[in-house]
Image: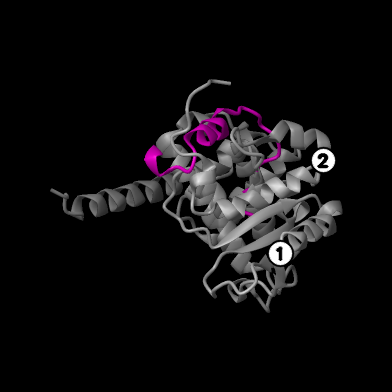
């Protein structure tokens, strides 16, 4: 590991009281890792942490709840924005537990303990050691970048970074395990009944993270397995629902060994997709040129 100074310790961030809860779980040997907005803000996105997501091994969810209650938090109903009455999977919002500080304001961030199976993260002992790491100046547990991207895919300026050292670690890991965000997106796309509001959140996480990596760490995306690169290359394009569903189905079949990456590309309407990409690139270029320069 390269040794260099952090520009701003995580303990000095405004959200430290939230990150510290990961240390509490770590001290009690609860298999978990941080996810959601906290990942993006650590990477430098100008987001406000509205909800701290702690992904917890399913069998330790009750133990994690007990730790949170010992820290003085109390259970709450969770954000109404994630309620989807038409869903058959998690219609009332995120599964697990939502907690908040007593007498906290209405806008104060809450804490969600989400089972790892829902976020498509393998938090078994072996996977935890390989695919997560402790922040170097704290005991907060983060996922490696590829582990986090992979899981989101299956359901679905450095001065602003809380800790530059944590960022370097997050971007320096080369493990290529089960990508959580991709898996979450694909499951939500292919299986009916999923909570579409949660799906929208996971999709936003995926797009923010991929766009950030494309701009600041493109080598990370090149390390993805070919099947996941197929997904990343196509999913961000504004495609019709049927074509987007085919992207998800092809990636799933690649993972199962039922389809080669070459055949997956061959089944896609490449000429149409390239036309869409060209139109989108021209639109974005026009938008950039229309923004007046400052100074």
Q: Which residues are magenta?
A: 152-179
Indicate the position of residue 206 as horizontal and vertical percent values. 55, 50
Q: Is residue 149 above or below residue 170?
A: below
Identify which residue is drawn at 52% across, 31% down: 220
Indicate the secondary structure of the residue bearing disc 1.
Answer: loop
Residue at 34% from the left image edge and 46% from the top image edge: 278
Mark 2 nearby-residue class (10 Å; few <14, some 14–19, many ≥20): some
Disc number at residue 72? 1
Residue in the foreground of this view, choosing between 70 and 109: 70
Answer yes or no: is residue 175 visible: yes
Give percent across and percent down for residue 147. Answer: 65, 39
Question: In the displayed structure, would residue 60 be above or below residue 140?
Answer: below
Colour pattern of the rendering: one colour
Vertical placement of residue 271 versus 59, above or below: above
Q: Which residue is mark 2?
A: 124
Q: Quadrant of residue 29?
A: top right
Circle number at residue 263: none
Percent x, y of residue 181: 63, 49
Answer with left or right where residue 98 lies relative to residue 203.
right
Residue 170 falls within the magenta-colored stretch: yes
The furthest residue to the right: 59
Which residue is the extreme one toward the top? 2
Q: Quadrant of the N terminus?
A: top right
Helix, strand or loop at label 2? It is: loop
User: Who is closer to the viewer here, 187 or 96?
Assistant: 96
Query: Is 233 displayed left or right of 72 in the figure?
Result: left
Q: Judge left or right: residue 48 versus residue 198.
A: left
Does residue 265 show up? no
Q: Residue at x 84, y 56 (%)?
A: 63
- Is the C-beta separation of discs 2 and 1 under 8 Å? no
* 3D distance between C-alphas at marks 2 and 1: 28 Å
């Amino acid at each position: 590991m390269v040794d260099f100074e952090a520009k701003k310790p995580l303990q000095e961030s405004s959200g430290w009281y939230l990150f510290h809860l990961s240390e509490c779980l770590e001290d009690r040997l609860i298999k978990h890792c941080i996810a959601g907005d906290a990942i993006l803000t650590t990477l430098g996105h100008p987001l406000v942490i509205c909800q701290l997501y702690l992904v917890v091994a399913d069998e330790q969810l009750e133990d994690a709840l007990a730790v949170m209650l010992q820290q003085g938090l109390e259970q709450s109903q969770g954000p109404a924005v994630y309620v989807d009455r038409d869903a058959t999977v998690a219609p009332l919002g995120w599964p697990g537990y939502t907690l908040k500080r007593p007498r906290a304001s209405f806008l104060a961030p809450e804490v969600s303990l989400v089972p790892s199976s829902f976020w498509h993260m393998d938090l078994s002992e072996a996977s935890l050691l390989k695919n997560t790491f402790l922040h170097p100046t704290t005991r907060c547990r983060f996922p490696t970048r590829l582990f986090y991207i992979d899981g989101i895919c299956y359901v679905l300026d450095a001065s602003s970074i809380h800790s530059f050292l944590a960022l370097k670690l997050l971007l320096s890991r080369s493990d290529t395990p089960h990508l959580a965000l991709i898996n979450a997106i694909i499951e939500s796309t292919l299986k009916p009944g999923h909570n579409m509001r949660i799906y929208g959140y996971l999709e936003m996480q995926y797009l923010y993270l991929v766009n950030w990596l494309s701009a600041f760490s493109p080598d990370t995306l090149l390390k993805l397995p070919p099947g996941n690169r197929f997904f990343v290359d196509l999913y961000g394009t504004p495609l019709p629902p049927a074509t987007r569903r085919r992207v998800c189905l092809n990636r799933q079949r690649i993972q199962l060994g039922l389809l080669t990456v070459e055949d997956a590309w061959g089944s896609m309407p490449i000429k149409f997709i390239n036309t869409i990409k060209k139109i989108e690139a021209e639109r974005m270029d026009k938008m950039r040129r229309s923004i007046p320069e400052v100074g």
